Amino acid sequence: MENMVLVGVIVFALIIILPSAIKIVSEWERGVILRLGRLVGARGPGFFVIIPFVDRMIKVDLRTLPMDVPPQDVITKDNVTVRVDAVVYFRVIDPEAAVVKITDHIRATSLISQTTLRNVLGQSELDELLAQREMLNQNLQKIIDEQTDPWGVKVSIVEIKNVELPEAMRRSMASQAEAERERRAKIIHADGEFQASEKLAQAGAVVGQEPATLQLRYLQTLVEICSEKNSTIVFPLPIDLIGMFLKKQPPTS
């Protein structure tokens, strides 16, 4: 009877202890082991056993984590207030440091990303923010990665998403763009007028050398008028042709 009680106690103890002793870590995770508060190391992936009530395991995800940076109000170097948000891609490369050296590496990375975003963009002018975004992304990634490196966190990509301008600034930029389009249109129109005047000058020179070309132009114009089926046709008659008819008329008695 006593043996059965002992066996029952052992079985009961195993049922309670075994689940806390057996650990399974996935391929994308690592288990950081603390033994009586002292760091033992990181284990995984796979199956292993820890000492119940003595060891404590903390799982750390090693996959790349995308994190949205909340919109930040930034005053640029040329004193323009803009609202900017971004996205940061990072992952843990040292699970032991992520557990021992920082209480919450995800929140810490988020906070350092927000402050770095404000500081870097605050040192840039609005034109740089709009036109040189790739360079700013690289600067942000480098600075944030240097600050999170002691925590075992690797920041791989930082992308500025949206840049919200004040309403007055948007209207000013729209007016500037419209003025630029009008300027280009006037330049194109003036260039076309200049080329047309050159062609007309060349045509005038040809007509001056060959008067017969003017007669051919008269005939071509008449053909074009007739093709439009107009009820009234105005035919331009050369003055020299009229003079020929006047010379041929006999004198009146």
Image: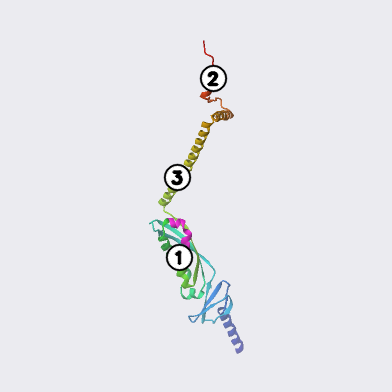
Task: Tell me: residue 81, above or below residue 44.
Answer: above
Give the mark, 2 or 3, whose residue is nearer the N terminus.
Answer: 3
Colour logic: rainbow
Circle 1 packing at 10 Å, graded few (<14), some (14-19), many (20+), is many
Residue annotated with mark 3: 183
Q: Nearer the viewer, mark 2 or mark 1?
A: 2
Does residue 172 show up? yes
Residue 160 visible to an observer of this rendering: no
Task: Name the front one of labels 2 and 3.
Answer: 2
- The Cα–Cα distance between marks 2 and 1, rounded to whole angstroms, is 95 Å
Identified by mark 2, the residue type is Phe
Q: Is residue 201 above or below residue 129?
A: above
Query: Which residue is nearer to you in this view: 122 or 56?
Result: 122
Q: CA distance from mark 2 to mark 3?
A: 54 Å
Q: Secondary structure at mark 1?
A: helix
| Coordinates of residue 80 in the picture (x, y in percent) | 39, 56
What is the secondary structure assignment of the residue under circle 3? helix
Q: Disc 1 marks which residue?
A: 113
Depth order, front residue of 99/151: 151
| Horizontal and vertical percent position of residue 73 | 41, 59
Residue 108 position, x and y percent, is 45, 69
